[in-house]
Amino acid sequence: MVLLDQTRLPSEEVELVCTDAPALVEAIRSLAVRGAPLLGIAGAYGVALAAARGFDVVEAARALEGARPTAVNLAVGVRRAESAYRAELAGTGEPTAAAVAALAAARALHQEDAEASTRMAAHGVALLDELLPGGGHRILTHCNSGSLVSGGEGTAFAVALAAHRAGRLRRLWVDETRPLLQGARLTAYEAARTGMAYTLLTDNAAGSLFASGDVDAVLIGADRIAADGSVANKVGSYPLAVLARYHHVPFIVVAPVTTVDPETPDGASIEVEQRPGFEVTEILAPQVPVTGAGGGIPVAPLGTQAYNPAFDVTPPELVTAIVTEEGAVSPVTAEALAELCARSRRATIG
């Protein structure tokens, strides 16, 4: 597998080659490859890679599935390729044919995600135009949700990009997204490449931006959506939802149907990944001598403990709408999400 190493962006575009599943697991854990939909695609290809190289597919699948626990798409992708592998192996007894089936399943998922991205963008722009007639949208986003997280042009970022192409985006406000700066490094990189008008801000400047009346809508992605509509996304999303509610600004989540997890009943049931403290106590600066335990420059006293959850959870009552490739759900309720998932299953079977 050949990946674009997202840890090296925006200063370098470097390919990372993974020759086996353990290398891909490390790439996922290190955030070289990240973003919920793309993790599903990578997980599926990882199963196919293990099968093609003759490794234990079940063992590889479990390792990949557990590489990042919050993102449900990773498990979905892994299980889809694994199921195709098992079915072909049971039918033919041929490991080579089973590996081909796993690869076909991964490629199909990749294509479906690209198509879902296009449909999400269309539904999202239609919703923005309904909520904010007249165009000139000023959109605030958090973390990264563009083509770097997708088989297509992304989730929330794809909506902003579609608005930009239609001449209806006035400004994209980009949260830097501490502590790993996915907004500054990745979303700003994508916005610059697509010619969007964008401005970067520190996460804690968002409140003053709302207070000045310069935000028309918040658009974020999601790593897992519980059955009740609770949304797990990059840490810092929940405070934006609270600010949006206070300032009467729409808070919109954009994610494929595969991100909705009916097996997770509510937000309290979502496992939130806790990441190493050195991501907070150190900063990474390429080509600068490092002295920190995590390979960075210390910005806190030696021995400082850090609280570093990768995600937070926004309750459904703070979410204006969830936009998927099957359409938008608003208000966000368990019943509406269940119907959306059922409609998606019927469309897939049909």
Image (tube, rainbow, N blue to C red):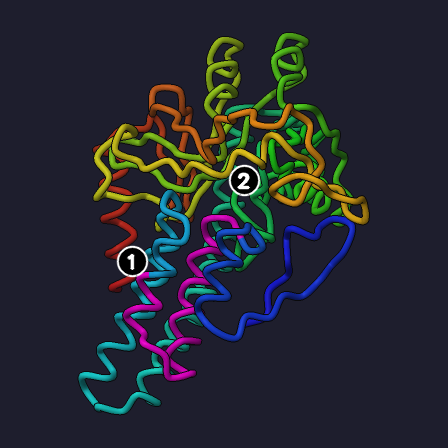
Q: Secondary structure at mark 1?
A: helix
Mark 2 vs mark 1, CA separation in Å: 23 Å
Pick out the residue farthest to the left.
90
The residue sitting at 61% across, 43% down in the picture is 294
- Specify whether residue 218 is in view: yes
Residue extent of the magenta highlight? 34-62
- Main SS class of the magenta portion in the image: helix
Q: Going by the image, does 20 lie left or right of 32? A: left
Amino acid type indicated by mark 2: Ala
User: Which sits in the foreground, 146 or 167?
Assistant: 146
- Compare residues 66 and 211 and report the one nearer the observer: 66
- Tell me where residue 230 appears, x and y as whole percent: 33, 30
Q: Residue at x 52, y 45 (%)?
A: 155
Can you see residue 166? no
Q: Measured along the vertical axis of the image, is residue 192 above or below residue 15?
A: above
**Residue under the image location 48 percent in, 26 percent down:** 307
Q: Nearer the viewer, residue 224 or 177?
A: 177
Indicate left or right for 135 with 30 as reference.
right
User: In x, y percent, where is residue 93?
Assistant: 21, 90
Crowding at dot 1, Cα within 10 Å, few <14 / some 14-19 / many 20+, comes out as few
Residue highlighted by disc 1: 347
Query: Which disc number belongs to residue 156?
Result: 2
Quadrant in which residue 181 is drawn: top right
Amino acid at the residue labelled 1: Ala
Examine the rendered structure and indicate whether residue 104 appears above or below residue 257: below
Number of the label disc, if any, that sits on residue 153: none
Tell me the mark number nearer the camera, choosing from 2 and 1: 2
**Quadrant in the rendering for residue 108:** bottom left
Q: Is residue 128 magenta?
A: no
Q: Position of residue 258 (x, y in %)?
A: 35, 51
